[in-house]
Image (cartoon, coloured by chain):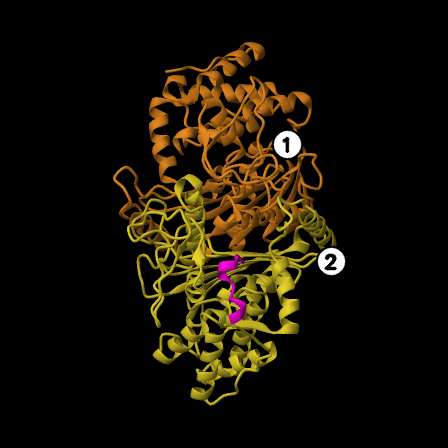
Chain colours: A yellow, B orange
Amino acid sequence: MLDQFKTPKSDEIRVDSTSLRHVVRQIFIKCGVPDYQAEIGSDVLVSTDLRGVDTHGVSNMLRIYVKDYISGKLNPKPKIKIVKENISNLNIDGDNGLGILQGPDAMKLAIGKAKKTGIGVVTLFNSGHIGAVGHHAMIAADNRMVGICLTAGGTLVLPTFAAETRTGTNPISLAAPSNTYPYFLFDAAMSSIAGNKVRLVARNGTKLSSGSIADNKGNPIMESVGIETSEDFIHIPPLLPLGGNRDQGSHKGYGLSLFVEILCTILSGNVPNMIDSKGNLCHFFAAFNIDSFTEYTQFIDNMDLMLSKLLDTPSISESERVIYPGIMEFENEADRIKNGIPLHKEVVEWFDNISIEMDIDKISTF
Amino acid sequence: MLDQFKTPKSDEIRVDSTSLRHVVRQIFIKCGVPDYQAEIGSDVLVSTDLRGVDTHGVSNMLRIYVKDYISGKLNPKPKIKIVKENISNLNIDGDNGLGILQGPDAMKLAIGKAKKTGIGVVTLFNSGHIGAVGHHAMIAADNRMVGICLTAGGTLVLPTFAAETRTGTNPISLAAPSNTYPYFLFDAAMSSIAGNKVRLVARNGTKLSSGSIADNKGNPIMESVGIETSEDFIHIPPLLPLGGNRDQGSHKGYGLSLFVEILCTILSGNVPNMIDSKGNLCHFFAAFNIDSFTEYTQFIDNMDLMLSKLLDTPSISESERVIYPGIMEFENEADRIKNGIPLHKEVVEWFDNISIEMDIDKISTF
């Protein structure tokens, strides 16, 4: 993660991950979510913070989930329904449940199909925010499979040359197992930056890179830029597709966001938020059973060969190293399990307040 | 396509597409390819030129295919072999056949699986260049399915911060049917530019955009730059991943190129070219049977809603319009069927020479 997105050391409070799991679980239960689901939600969010994906952990989204449960926008006890099924796929109506609670089960259904046929695909609509999509892809990797998870929703992002936003940030993730190296885990928005990165920059008082956002007429801002913030509300400006502007390839980021929109939203029988702004989020889960394609041991050994070759690649400067997606997450996890998860003091304050409000335990700091 | 990649009008000769099909088919036959396969190869290449994807039509690659058949690198009569199969997938050894000849059949096998189970996936290794991956994805769209085609090979592209190239340009394509609008067709390299774009710029004497290539130490060149060329040989400099440099998101382009590498190469039981430079190319084909997820008519109507909304999006300037992937290709096709395919005069000269050499028909110009 670029420095501008990191919580400044002076504002950082390290929080014990076990305590955080416990408190987040209690928050979900207080919102009316059943125990089993609250456990999953807490695991998804805290695992995400442990991996260092601060944009999608407890800091930004949990307070929104709580608000949405209270307002009735989210259904704490959804009755999910299989709308259509074939030997290798399922299409599921999530009944306005929260995506982070539904994602792991959806991926497990895809894995179940893939065990029998080689491939399993599940689409899930009428669902809420799914957190870091990579978390769900990783479940497949832990089951000897390659996992893909995508999510579509929102209209924060400009098509190339557009003066109005149309697509979501629409992240793509893929996880794959390896032998001795940390698992490969790619997870990235198809906009230049995830919407939550704007919140981090606003909170940290830093700047976004060139090609991240546009001005209010849609013109790409090709220099670094700060984000104004009032106390309560961070306005998210129009985000640019991955690539920034047309010359630098924004048509590819735009096309990839539609790739995600089609597989998540239209394949599940829905229209994107640019047509219907109810906020119906749609997700896509795919599991590829490695044993159906090749020998599993050969696959993970070949992964190791590739990953080690990438790590051994000489870099352009001594201050940078060549890595692969997943390794930073692995290193963060080792550090954060031991030394705690660094949260912004403002986030810790929110937790302390909600603990009083909900009459639940407080989080333990280091 | 940006202006720098277009053949200058003064160097352009319009060629009749039917005549081009006929001549390309004869060239393949002279290379020892069976009639049925020669027909497919001619269709893939000329369809690609008709769509305006000049980088992947007859101009750049056909002469390389011919060389590779003559040198024995490509096998004109491969005996393909199913290495592993499950209900929804196949893994195929292509026996060094040319990818553009094998891709359509591979996608048809995926479609056949998807008809029965909802999803079909085929991986194909020991294969040659596959042309524009979107061509193969489109075959699924023509069969009431969403199609994905990926290909991995080569080591032209730098990982983020790397001083040496490691990954291929690794394009991703997705095609999806619509009702009254031209089909959606996304097809793009996960490097900033496809390798063939360097050849076009060199041939046209124009410049590459900022963030397309690096200097020979791996440092991203963040300004527009020309390509030196000697008569016979165009050296392809290190290409940058989509995003350009780290600040502008090159880690996403790099991650997406590994996404493709894993699904094409490692899933099919192989190692990427960064480990073994034999030039073994690997491809991935997926077909998603729309009828297994939702009603087909609803899908294509929802596609129309999205595509029309995108086309109606106000643009940042009068000289630009908001489009979606596939519409330019559709418009090009209509124009080029009628008015011919614009080839660089140097390409027409190559055709004329090979027609004499191989004792086959000449292409008809307009």
Q: Residues within 10 Å of mark 1 (few under 14, many from 20)?
A: many
Q: In the displayed structure, does residue A351 sit left or right of residue B299?
A: right
Q: Name above or below for residue A357 compared with residue A167.
A: below
Q: Is residue A309 one of those drawn in magenta?
A: no
Amino acid, disc 1:
Gly
Name the residue: 73% across, 52% down.
Answer: A301
Of residues B229 and B173, the one drawn nearer to the viewer in this rendering: B229
Q: Return the x and y of residue B134 as percentages of the image width and height.
A: 48, 39
**Which label number is shown at residue A199?**
none
State the image coordinates of residue A109 (x, y, percent, origin top left). 55, 66
Disc number for residue B97: 1
Q: Secondary structure at mark 1?
A: strand
Identify the subunit bearing mark 2. Answer: A
The residue range painted magenta reads A1-10
Q: Secondary structure at mark 2?
A: loop
Near-viewer residue (A225 or A134): A225
Vertical comparison of B362 with A101: above or below? above
| Occupied quadrant, residue B101 | top right
- Quadrant holding the N terminus of chain B: top left
Task: Say if B191 sits above or below A78 in the image.
Answer: above
Left or right relative to B129: residue B294 = left
Image x and y of residue A226, in percent: 39, 58
Tag on residue A180? 2
Which of discs 1 and 2 lies nearer the camera? The answer is 2
Instruction: Tell if the residue under mark 1 belongs to the same chain as the one under mark 2.
Output: no
Q: Quadrant of residue A356?
A: bottom left
Residue type at the position of mark 2: Thr
Q: Decide if residue B58 is in sight here.
A: no
View extreme (front): residue = A10
Residue B362 image point, x, y percent:
48, 13
- How far apart are the alpha carbons under marks 1 and 2? 35 Å
